Image (cartoon, rainbow, N blue to C red):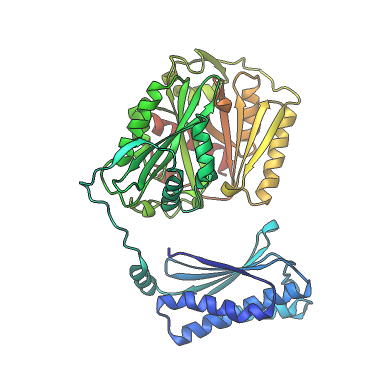
Amino acid sequence: MSGSARLEIPAQQAFLEPVLGFVLAYAARFERGEAAQAELRAAVKAALEMVIDNNAQAASREPVGVEVREESGQLWVTIINRGAPILLKGGRGGVHAAYYAKFHEASQHADSVTFENSGRQGQSVVLQVRLGPEAAAKSLRAEAPQAPVIPEDEMIEVRSLLPGEEDTLSRLFYLVYGYDYINEFVYYPEKIRVMIEAGDLHSIVAVRPNGRLVGHVGLMRRQREPAVFEAGMGAVDPMVKSRGLFGEIFSKTMGVVRQTPMQYCLCDCVTNHAFSQRHVAKFGGFEMALYAGCQSRETQARLERLGLGKDPEGMLRYSLLVSVIPRTAHPFGEDIVLPESIGERFGFLLKPLGLAWSPAPRFQTLPAVGSFKTSTQKAQSAALFDLAEPGQEAAEDIVEEWRELLRDGFAYAAVEVPLDRPGLGPLYDLLSSNGFFASGFVPYHCSARLGFRFQALGPTKVAFEEVKIATEHGKKLLSAVKKDYEANCLL
């Protein structure tokens, strides 16, 4: 897919011609003829006039958004109406006949015109025009940037980040992720500096002779008592090809882990490739949970951008594999009580952590009330329900709140519950009957307490068959999660 282009304009007819020029200039990259450009102009003009007229009549102050992009030989033009809703009902003879006529006119000049309601985000008129794969491919070949490759014999030093290098670290994250990395603090050098000075972040970097950073892994403190750290923030400049640089940085980071007193080191790995998973396993990591479809496609570093091939087309959301590297013999204690419905399916995850499980009483009940807190990640369209005190009323409220979030466009939800509270079996039954499925065990609040995570998905596609897992232990987890998903979520 070639890069998209976006702009926003006031809902005024004076901006109609500049927008048409903007769309046609983008389309001209694909060597279209004059007749094809005229058809595109007519389609966009009719759709845009409809949106502008509607907002002008309502005296709307909300801007109109316009996005144009190419994908798989198709040109997509999206006009976003954030003002008064456009109502097409009533047809040719209704009060909205003028809007219907404009919509119909746009349809005569585009291959497809659809009207999408996005709830609080407004509405979108989406025009689709066939470019033909040859024209699209020609443009992509002509415009594809030829990134320089660092010579394999160039000496690259792996060391700790030095004071004053925080700006170059932010630049590295931009080069790898754009401005879409999940932790926004990486784009603020001053925040990185404060975290390092406080001992909350240890940055291991790879540095070229000219001082440019080309790789990074961070060790972040997640809990002070007991001491818990997380290894993450992995980034390698796409200019570095096939020299095992990430492995060198990760090995150096694990050296810091061995020298730092801690209960355990937490790792989460992407699953569109298995490279980082292999490194975690090499240093004693064991998979505990799979967050299936927890992240939006936009916040992931695409394999193509990293020079590692292409991501699966059917994977609309990405999954994370969560592992723990124990630094004590029993980081979560020595035994735990689980309902048989969870213990029999997921108990194998506990053995590498030195934990044994015993079955909970068969007729254990869920307390009547309970309590939970909700947090959301808008960039991920995700919600987390922290069910600190499991209870029937709290669980039912979570289910109802998730239904509301679904209507607002959210695509992923998780419920985390500590295992030292009663009623996990009845809770599992209640949540599974409402579309939730198991994720696995999690360090509850990154402490020595163990929790269990349930998850739910909106109308999206995860593509379990495309999830890449490096170890047999992890593959067994993937199979268990997939089976639970199929049992609870598929008709």
- Residue 85 in the figure: left or right of residue 239: right
Q: Name the residue: 69% across, 38% down.
A: 399
Is residue 212 in view? yes
Percent x, y for residue 36? Answer: 47, 83
Please state the total of marks drawn on the protein image: 0
- Furthest-bottom residue in this view: 35
| Residue 432 image-quadrant placement | top right
Is residue 183 in view? no
- Residue 452 in the figure: left or right of residue 353: right
- Residue 62 in the figure: left or right of residue 235: right
Q: Quadrant of the N terminus?
A: bottom left
Percent x, y for residue 447? Answer: 55, 23
Percent x, y for residue 208? Answer: 30, 46
| Residue 110 image-quadrant placement | bottom right
| Residue 114 image-quadrant placement | bottom right
Location of residue 262 with respect to 180 vertically, above or below: above
Q: Quadrant of the C terminus?
A: top right
Looking at the picture, tell me which residue is in the foreground, 152 or 462.
152
Location of residue 150 with respect to 129 vertically, above or below: above
Q: Name the residue: 54% across, 45% down.
A: 184
Percent x, y for residue 449? Answer: 56, 20
Looking at the picture, tell me which residue is in the foreground, 390 or 160.
160
- Furthest-top residue in this view: 334
Location of residue 179 with respect to 487 vertically, above or below: below
- Furthest-front residue in this view: 164
